[in-house]
Image (cartoon, rainbow, N blue to C red):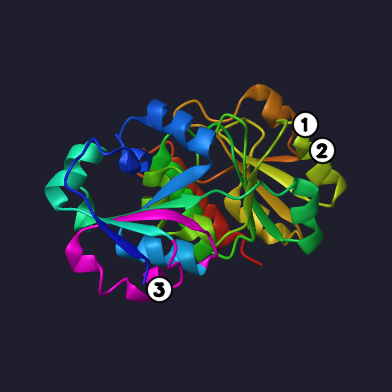
Amino acid sequence: MSSLVPLDDPADPRLADYVQLREVNLRRLLEEEHGLFIAEGDKVIRRAADAGYEPRSFLLAPRWLESLHEVLAKWPDKPVFVVSEELAEQVTGFHVHRGALASYRRRAARPLTELLRDAPRRIAIFDDIVDHTNVGAGFRAAAAMGVELVLVTPTCADPLYRRSIKVSMGAVFQVPWTRLDTWPGDLELLQDSGYVAAAFALTDDSITLDDLAARHDERLALIFGTEGHGLKPHVLDKADLTVRIPMAGGVDSLNVASSAAVAFYATRP
């Protein structure tokens, strides 16, 4: 069993990893500086551990010690801060659902060239999606529909931010992903590797999703843009195809995560 450390002071410096989890800018700086991310909830904590991530510490209400015993037993040298749910709320700035958190070490990003060696048939690209909920939902859809690689552009929200992880139900640990260095420059590398770059946007020359699915392309890179404004013109210019999802009922478009789920299903190999 990991080392149990009962704490009753919300200002204890050992709890620094868990401070103000809702302050996105503060958390981004802290997590980047220390190379960590926060897993919330027992299922997500388990999935991070199963994916091989190394914990820094755990922050648990007493009732979770027994059910997470197997996870804690793998890391006997990692501290388990045992706190009341009230203290957890004071530290984190919100009511911690189920009173279970863990701080894990991030891994070094894998280069795109290395990830392409596995020859994934379906790749998702999330460009400048700023809402962590949408990023998490997009990853969950990718995992559910068999997408083998997710790429996020330099301005996309962090897939390992607590909210993204929680919404994805740990799918961010399941699907290989990396952040692109240059965008849309890296699109040329995908195209040179045999991928058809299909950008989802409402344009005059777009084909329907049904048309795209009927092509049965061996390798597809499906590109989804930011909430509201969608993909920028210079990205559309570099794509091979522009694709739209036909709508009914006077609706012009879907939420980006919903669009991605529909597209992943329709184009599954």
Q: Position of residue 206 (x, y in %)?
A: 64, 38
Which dot, 2 or 3, sits closer to the camera?
3
Q: Position of residue 88 (x, y in %)?
A: 20, 46
The image shows residue 177, relative to residue 22, as above or below, that is below
Residue 137 visible? The answer is no
Which residue is tagged 3? 73
As drawn, is 134 to the left or to the right of 198? left
Residue 198 visible? The answer is yes
Quadrant containing the N terminus is: bottom left
In the rendered image, residue 75 lying in the magenta stretch gets the answer yes
Q: Are marks 2 and 1 in contact (CB under 8 Å)?
A: yes
Instruction: Find the magenta span and give its range.
Output: 51-77
Q: Position of residue 141 (x, y in %)?
A: 48, 57
The residue type indicated by label 1 comes to Gly
Secondary structure at badge 3 equals helix
Secondary structure at badge 1 equals loop
> Mark number for residue 83?
none
Give the spatial CA distance, label 3 vs label 1: 45 Å
The residue type indicated by label 2 comes to Glu
In depth, the one of 70 and 196 nearer the eye is 70
Which residue is tagged 2? 188
The residue type indicated by label 3 comes to Ala
> Mark number for residue 185?
1
Judge the density around disc 1: few (<14), some (14-19), many (≥20) Cα neighbours within 10 Å: few
Q: Residue at x 23, y 35 (%)?
A: 11
Sequence-first tag of 3 and 1: 3
Sequence-first tag of 2 and 3: 3
Quarter where residue 102 is shown: bottom left
